Image: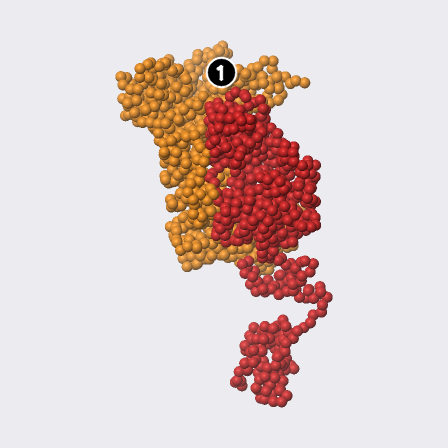
Amino acid sequence: MAAHLKKRVYEEFTKVVQQQHEELSAKKLRLAKPSKSAALHVDLCKAASPADALQHLLHFARRPVEVESVEGVVRILLEHYYKENDASVRLKIASLLGLLSKTAGFSPDCIMDDAINTLQNEKSHQVLAQLLDTLLVIGTKLTENPPVRMRLVEVACKHLTDSSHGVRNKCLQLIGCLGPVEKGVAKEVESQSAKDVQKIIGDHFNDQDPRVRTAAIKAMLQLHERGLKLQQAIYCQACKLLADDYEQVRSAAVQLIWVLSQLYPESIVPIPSSNEEIRLVDDAFGKICHMVSDGSWVVRVQAAKLLGSMQQVSSHFLEQTLDKKLMSDLRRKRTAHERAKELYSSGEFSSGRKWGDDAPKEEIDTGAVNLIESGACGAFVHGLEDEMYEVRIAAVEALCMLAQSSPAFAEKCLDFLVDMFNDEIEEVRLQSIHTMRKISHNITLREDQLDTVLAVLEDSSRDIREALHELLCCTNVSTKEGIHLALVELLKNLTKYPTDRESIWKCLKFLGSRHPTLVLPLVPELLSTHPFFDTPEPDMDDPAYIAVLVLIFNAAKSCPTMPALFSDHTFRHYAYLRDSLSHLVPALRLPGRKLVSSPVSPSITPSEDPCQQFLHQSLERVYNLQHLDPQGVQELLEFTIRDLQRLGELQSELAGMADFTATYLQCQLLLIKALQEKLWNVAAPLYLKQNVLASAAAKQILEETYKMEFMYSGVESRQVVIIHHMRLQAKALQLIVTARTTRGAEPLFGMCEKFLQEVDSFQRCFISELPHMQGSFVDKLLDLMPRLVTSKPSEVVKILQTTLRQSTFLHLPLPEQLHRATATIIEPTGESDNPLRFTSGLVVALDVDATLEHVQDPQGTVKVQVLYPDGQAQLIHPKPADFRNPGPGRHRLITQVYLSHTAWTEPCQIEVRLLLAYNSNRSKAAKISKSSWSDSMDALPPSENAIEGTIPFSKPVKVYIMPKPARR
Amino acid sequence: LSSVSLGAGAGQDVGRSCILVSIAGKNVMLDCGMHMGYNDDRRFPDFSYITQNGRLTDFLDCVIISHFHLDHCGALPYFSEMVGYDGPIYMTHPTKAICPILLEDYRKITVDKKGETNFFTSQMIKDCMKKVVAVHLHQTVQVDEELEIKAYYAGHVLGAAMFQIKVGCESVVYTGDYNMTPDRHLGAAWIDKCRPDLLISESTYATTIRDSKRCRERDFLKKVHETVERGGKVLIPVFALGRAQELCILLETFWERMNLKAPIYFSTGLTEKANHYYKLFITWTNQKIRKTFVQRNMFEFKHIKAFDRAYADNPGPMVVFATPGMLHAGQSLQIFRKWAGNEKNMVIMPGYCVQGTVGHKILSGQRKLEMEGRQILEVKMQVEYMSFSAHADAKGIMQLIRQAEPRNVLLVHGEAKKMEFLKQKIEQEFHVNCYMPANGETTTIFTNPSIPVDISLGLLKRETAIGLLPDAKKPKLMHGTLIMKDNSFRLVSSEQALKELGLTEHQLRFTCRVHIQDPRKEHETGLRVYNHLKAILKDYSVQHLPDGSITVESILIQATAHSEDQGTKVLLVSWTYQDEELGSYLTSLLKKGLPQSTA
């Protein structure tokens, strides 16, 4: 058969060769561009040595091959394959076959027979392995063809007896990827072979080569992933593999055991060396726990990670993982945790410790001590103490997952988590704080634990402190001393790191509202009121005092008796804080004071919020009154804009919406104003000033539209249309203004054409939205389109002018959620009077720390701009790693900006600010239309669509610097 | 067969580690420590025990030092220079760097302060260090052609190592002191599954299972922090090397993390020199230090400064590390006397204190101390005890045994009673023999060495071709000739063996006569026999030769008439030695007689 095939192949290609030679000999024919396959063939034929041939193949592999010629190339390669004596060349050919069959659109079933045939006569193990790899590629391309897969699996089974590990490896991989998994179809045949596949792979669990063992386990896992239900019998075999000498085998075996424990959690397995039986999932849990103290850290990480997802394990086993019997000189000793707990329960807190406090107590029966537990004992104790932080993190994660599903376990693991707050690696500390937060609904902190937690508040890392604040927001504290302690520590934190102000206030807000009854007895002390004497009124601007008030007011919300304890100035301060920090201070029902909002507050639902109502009403007004005289419209717009801006300042949750609409109205206002100019009636050159005004208006509108499009998150396509429409109007305005000011029609030609193109693309992008835009500028324009295309620029301008003036004003629908991207630079603060001195010509690093809210994809869009006093501007792209994501919608940029300048005589201020870069190619319109209009979009000239720019979105911060001349 | 003898040290005692191992004819000395408790001859091991007459250099193949603590290396200059040893001494690079500093310090105290004579000199220390060969972790060092050693990381102190000693296929692992839990500056001990014949493990904490280190660290930091916040001064008496560095790192990182400003001082001298080496041997430290040293070497302390005598009187909070650790003399005692009167201050004892020292007194609660010159010192400052020990506990020892999977375990460096418990546990859990010899006792361990035999590829292929595929789990029978020559074993085919040995091949033939009652003619009998055999031995080639004889494979059968009785035919069966199996089968077959002919 093979011989016959070979012959056929030879026959086929002798022809090609001849033609090829002819072509080459006649130089004229070079224009006919020989096909790639042919060129390769010639190259290979000419190759004098194997090294030469290898070079040709390598060269060939660098270029892509068209789908049509793949088969031809494959045939040529196969022909050479049979002729080739050198194994390395055959190897390369085999790998090329695999690459080629990956070509998209090529169906490799036509070359499968040939590929299988090559296997038969191959002697080199490496080439065999490579060929099997090729078959694997072919097989994965033909997954829908069961007979083919069956055949490949058979081939693989045949080669499983090969003496080389590489070949066996590939065979197992092949079986794993292609072995039949369907049970239902053709039951007799399939189920029979399915069983076989598992058995065949299982037999290789004992292979002499560790790589093959690993491959066997991986193949088994692969089968599982593809949906085959593994047999329980494998469990025993897998358990034996846990004691393997090689880490990759153990690592894979741990995975396999985990998979099996998830498949058969409830089946019963016997415990060796005794006649008891336990659930499989418990047994597996114990075994994986054992691997947490494995010699290889890779296995330890793997084991620790998997523990987290074994939630069916019984609580008895789970609790053992935290158990470690201490002893000293054979006497039982209590752990520090136990001692702490005891101290706490005996009511004695923070006693001075005596030596011998930890003195061992009762004698231990030597027989009863089990030094190496078979079960889960102390797995997490080991994992959390591991020397590799990867293992510790994995253990903390696993603890988190298990504690989330089991409150009892959460309570128990608390001590250990608290201990992790003191890890030497910040990442681990952070992770354990986050974990604690996630399980906080299940736990109540004891005082001594709280003490340890709070000690971390002094950490110099902002991330840690903020994470801790978040944790405190949702912790349950058991006693009033606890609350007091927390408050004291938070205030200490505040004095040490004043930048944490907001975060601490927020934290106290939640702390107060969660524990009103615990705060109540503390109130007199906190406010330092005295039953008989008036105490001095505290400073209202003191952040610490505000912090205390935030705690108290939030507690008072659900504790009506509390306001009775307030002194007069507290009420005044309440009123002030309620206004200035409304997001932190809730509305209180205070005696003797009828607050307008308080009776309403319980009944309002978000949609009926008066602010929201106000917003909608004012917008309604604007949209209805468009037919008034221009003067009236302008005034109304001005007032509405002012209202909206104020609303945005007051109501933070509506700020995005209010700003967005205000910006839109602003654009409209500018447009109206520009169109009101008298210049339209007079000869242009005479009114140069107005001219400037109008063109400035057009420019500003353009800018604002970009802001609207890119600075807000939650903008939907409906809004994008309107924004683009506004931009189109601005462009029209620009065109008109230019037409008025420039003489001669030449430059206008280009501009008109460009504008019309834009109209065209607008139409194509937003065709689905056009019906909603009755009577708008673009609607009218599109009606006139045929005329516009044929007319002269001057006419076009005239038409535009009239349409612009007649067009109605589009209603801007509001999306559900709209947030404006904001950025606050925390550092540098801009308050320092000490200039940053450095030698000119060298660089100085300036730490920039900023929080970003509602920025999508900050890594790509946020830039830092540095403006020097001489007007020189520098744009810095922060590294992606400089961005952290502490919460949804929030980002934090911590980066270093390198400054440099030539020498100055005096220190001067530079400005640092953040910019939001945009690129209209990435615009939402493009994204939205991509699906339906991808072809036409591609056809658009890129220059037209790619407008790049930046929007400043943070307040600039001034930094005092002083480049000194270099000393020589 | 390898034997271990404990050269008057280690055994069931802490201090003066010195172990002599004879393994497959090689003698290795492990550690060469001194005993802190004695000031006479007993402080050094008794080297006359090793060899009564003859030089040590001739007897010992090498000396291995596990780490720089004096109870493991203190007797080295005495041993090499005064007793006389010129062979190689192996230790790791950090040990080699730090060991002479400690030895010099030890010499100074003994000679200069106590005024002893007949002690080793500075020059001797230098000469001794010249004999040292430094090794890297996991580097296999070939001491001679057969003996090789390999170091593994042991934690404990900087540069501490466990050593695997291997001769042929016999091996011993000596742990020295080790620590299975990582600390602030060192990682955990680690060994691969080397399956040694014997594991010699320390067992200082044979009966202790320790609590997590984190609680202790947190307690320590909290106490220091609170005292400093109160404006008090903290005194931490330490020994210069080892724990001191751990505590420094701990405080340094805490200061860094918490942004504290109070000064930390370290009394100068010995420590500074040693600290220098800690900075250099970053690869020997734990993960955190190794990963961050590019930004900043953790041992380049930012907050810890050198101490000056005058600083002790400075107002305000401070933390001072001062030597020695037991408050019995020197700087730590001076500072203690200055600060003891103030209840705001605190002293933290980070380790064990010997009876009779000030440290021990204050730890046991004594508040009034009598100093020299009849002075009474009232101690008002707080006294804290905080144990930071870097030895493996019972669990750690078990874990190491689990990792290494030795065939025998030998416990040293611990107390007999405690070791008894651990021994029992080890035997119970791992089912291996465990020994705990006393000082000077010799333990002999019988090994079951596997002997490697070279086999030619041709023979191997030929033999494996017969029968089934090789199975790792089952033994397989092979035919060949074993040649033992020049201390090596080779399995070769018999032809090859003959050729090599210059022998000619002799053929061994067995012949056997079988008598059969058959009245027929000879050739007819032959034919009958032929037919019979043909019918039975279907798989073999049975041939009837023209001369009337029959061959079955290479076995020849001839039928002749009995010289006396014509009715009896004699069948002559002859086979070579190689065909013994078939030959004997044939004879037994023929002895049963031929079937009654049907013809």
The chain in orange: A
Give the x, y percent position of residue A641. Answer: 38, 17
The chain in red: B
Q: Amino acid at mark 1?
A: Arg
Q: Is A746 in front, or is A396?
A: A396
Q: Is B538 in front, or is B364?
A: B364
Residue B589 vertical position relative to residue A719 in the rendered view, above or below: below
| Residue that appears at 54% across and 59% down | B473
Residue B259 vertical position relative to residue A629 in the rendered view, above or below: below
- Left/right placement of residue B369 relative to residue A520 reads right
Chain that bears disc 1: A
| Residue that appears at 28% across and 23% down | A560
- Left/right placement of residue B53 relative to residue B297 reads right
Q: Is B354 in front, or is B88?
A: B354
Residue furthest top in the image: A686
**Would you name the residue on which mark 1 appears?**
A740
Would residue A902 be seen by someone viewing this image from the given angle? yes
> In what element is the residue under mark 1?
helix
Would residue A297 be seen by someone viewing this image from the given angle? no
